[in-house]
């Protein structure tokens, strides 16, 4: 036993000496002098590596960043870093701030005082917008500074340009001193979905991702489901509580979710898809009736951003002994990529069905991990600021990942702005003979197979509704069927359709 203990002790000492020797040979990271950058850090640094930050935006998120960083001094010391917020640029210097300013921090109203300051190592942009914010981000990258941003709209609109600018700027840097680009806060606020896709899924093959990626719409739909509210009443409540903007179009129209989905597609599949190419429908047409019929079929309604890889050849599983439509089975080796943002019928067996309020969630289907779900706060001061701080500390330590590590496959996935799914179709009608026969003929002519038809007892023969669920079919055929339905004399108003997720 003594020999074994001694042997173990000697082995441990050898390992320790080897580790120290490696640290001495490799050396510590370069500190920033002129264009030099903080890189990876040894465990035993003589002094903390300083990172001077210029913060562009001192509002809700900016204040949260300051609060978190200043409250994490002990953590920074344990990591061997010292993050100093040197300058904060705001619109109005005279406006009182609801957070204490760090010692020595300058508050300015001219962004040039940050962009032109050669001592600033990292620029953190949380002002929003796509004009001045773009100039801040692009100039900082070109000058070799690290950049952290929470700006999903900017990234979605200028993704190829951002990648080109990063590559061009870093080609001029010494190996190991390249500028880093962090954007964890741009999608789903406090959920580390960006870092997960940058690191944890690199060795995996993502086949599908589905996400509740807008808190405002999930709050509205949750209240409609649980409180029986109409869309307009649920929107009013969301506005009163601060979940909806004065003009909620970006949220309720699905456009905010589409910007985020574009970014997730690039990370998950390595493919850059034009934002306008992604089919997008919001929640303004969803009614209390849809929640009633969804509940009767064992599900609910959620606004989802969905991207999936398939071969364009969906095959229905054997019929299930319930009203829930059969799940789709996609070839893992498919060469086609489809995506959409839309209200969706989500069965209660799916984790996303239980996500309520302003909470966000992303479900990832992959070859190695099966189904993975990340759930958390998608907005708010501290959740969003926490993601920004995570990026800042990663950069300070030299542990940040490549922003878009997955490159397009060869041959590249083919993106089509159509998609295949089972569909829920709600039809409003006035009672007369032959409606079911007419529906069957219209769907047959459009190439749509009906899976089931559900109708609650008719209370008003002149204004009632029923719902059809289809077998898997291309959305173009559903649109064709809906146009034909609306042209009949018994159909009242527009029909409503939404895809069914597994």
Image (spheres, rainbow, N blue to C red):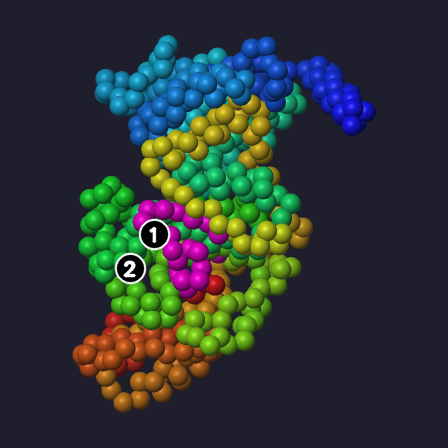
Q: Looking at the picture, does residue 482 appear above or below residue 152? A: below
How many numbered discs, if any?
2
Q: Which of 58 and 156 is in front in this view?
A: 58
Residue 262 coordinates in the image, percent (x, y): 47, 47
Q: What stretch is highlighted in magenta?
A: 339-363
Q: Residue furthest bottom?
A: 433
Residue ID at (30%, 78%): 455
Bin the neighbour count of mark 2 within 10 Å (Cα to Cα): few under 14, some 14-19, many 20 and up: many
Say whether residue 274 is visible.
Answer: no
Q: Nearer the viewer, residue 9 or 34?
A: 9
Q: Looking at the picture, does residue 407 appear above or below residue 98? A: below
Residue 389 coordinates in the image, percent (x, y): 44, 28
Secondary structure state at the residue bearing disc 1:
loop
Residue ID at (47%, 54%): 210
Q: In this view, does 102 lie to the left or right of 14?
A: left
User: What residue sits right under mark 1 in the picture?
Assistant: 356
Q: Do the residues labelled 2 and 1 touch (CB within 8 Å)?
A: yes
Is residue 158 within the magenta segment? no
Residue 361 coordinates in the image, percent (x, y): 43, 48
Q: Which mark is residue 225?
A: 2
Secondary structure state at the residue bearing disc 2:
helix
Whichever of labels 2 and 1 marks the residue nearer the N terminus, that label is 2
């Amino acid at each position: 036993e003594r020999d074994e203990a001694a042997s173990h002790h000697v082995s441990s000492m050898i390992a320790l000496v080897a580790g120290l020797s490696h640290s001495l040979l490799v050396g510590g990271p370069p500190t920033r002098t002129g264009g030099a950058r903080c890189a990876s850090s040894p465990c035993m640094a003589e002094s903390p590596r300083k990172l001077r930050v210029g913060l562009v935006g001192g509002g809700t998120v900016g204040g949260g960043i300051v609060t978190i960083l200043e409250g994490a001094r002990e953590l920074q010391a344990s990591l061997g870093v010292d993050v100093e917020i040197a300058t904060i640029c705001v619109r109005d210097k005279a406006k009182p701030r609801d957070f204490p300013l760090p010692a020595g921090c300058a508050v300015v109203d001219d962004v040039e005082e940050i962009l032109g300051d050669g001592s600033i190592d990292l620029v953190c942009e949380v002002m929003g917008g796509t004009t001045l914010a773009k100039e801040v981000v692009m100039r900082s990258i070109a000058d070799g500074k690290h950049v952290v941003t929470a700006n999903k709209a900017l990234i979605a609109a200028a993704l190829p340009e951002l990648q080109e600018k990063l590559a061009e700027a870093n080609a001029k840097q010494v190996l190991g001193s390249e500028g880093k680009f962090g954007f964890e806060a741009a999608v789903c606020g406090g959920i580390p979905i960006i870092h997960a896709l940058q690191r944890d899924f690199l060795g995996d093959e993502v086949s599908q991702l589905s996400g509740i990626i807008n808190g405002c719409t999930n709050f509205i739909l949750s209240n409609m489901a649980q409180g029986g509210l109409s869309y307009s009443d649920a929107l009013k409540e969301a506005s009163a509580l601060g979940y909806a903007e004065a003009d909620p179009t970006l949220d309720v129209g699905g456009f905010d979710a589409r910007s985020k989905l574009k970014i997730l597609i690039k990370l998950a599949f390595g493919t850059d898809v034009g934002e306008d190419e992604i089919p997008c429908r919001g929640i303004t047409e969803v009614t209390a009736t849809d929640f009633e019929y969804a509940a009767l079929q064992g599900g609910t309604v959620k606004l989802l951003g969905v991207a999936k890889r398939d071969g364009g050849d969906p095959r229905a599983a054997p019929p299930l002994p319930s009203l829930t439509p059969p799940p789709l089975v996609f070839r893992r080796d498919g060469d086609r990529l489809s995506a959409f943002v839309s209200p969706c019928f989500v069965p209660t067996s799916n984790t996303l069905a239980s996500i309520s309020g302003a909470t966000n969630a992303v479900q990832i289907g992959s070859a190695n991990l099966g189904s993975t779900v990340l759930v958390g706060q998608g907005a708010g001061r501290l959740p969003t600021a926490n993601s920004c701080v995570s990026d800042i500390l990663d950069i300070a330590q030299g542990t940040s990942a490549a922003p878009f590590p997955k490159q397009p496959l060869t041959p590249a996935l083919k993106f089509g702005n159509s998609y295949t799914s089972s569909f829920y179709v709600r039809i409003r009608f006035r009672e007369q003979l032959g409606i079911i026969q007419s529906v069957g003929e219209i769907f047959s002519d459009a190439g749509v197979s009906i899976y089931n038809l559900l109708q609650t007892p008719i209370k008003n023969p002149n204004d009632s509704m029923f719902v059809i669920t289809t077998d898997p079919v291309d959305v173009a055929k559903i649109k064709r069927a809906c146009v034909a339905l609306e042209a009949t004399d018994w159909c009242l108003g527009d029909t409503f359709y939404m895809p069914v997720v597994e």
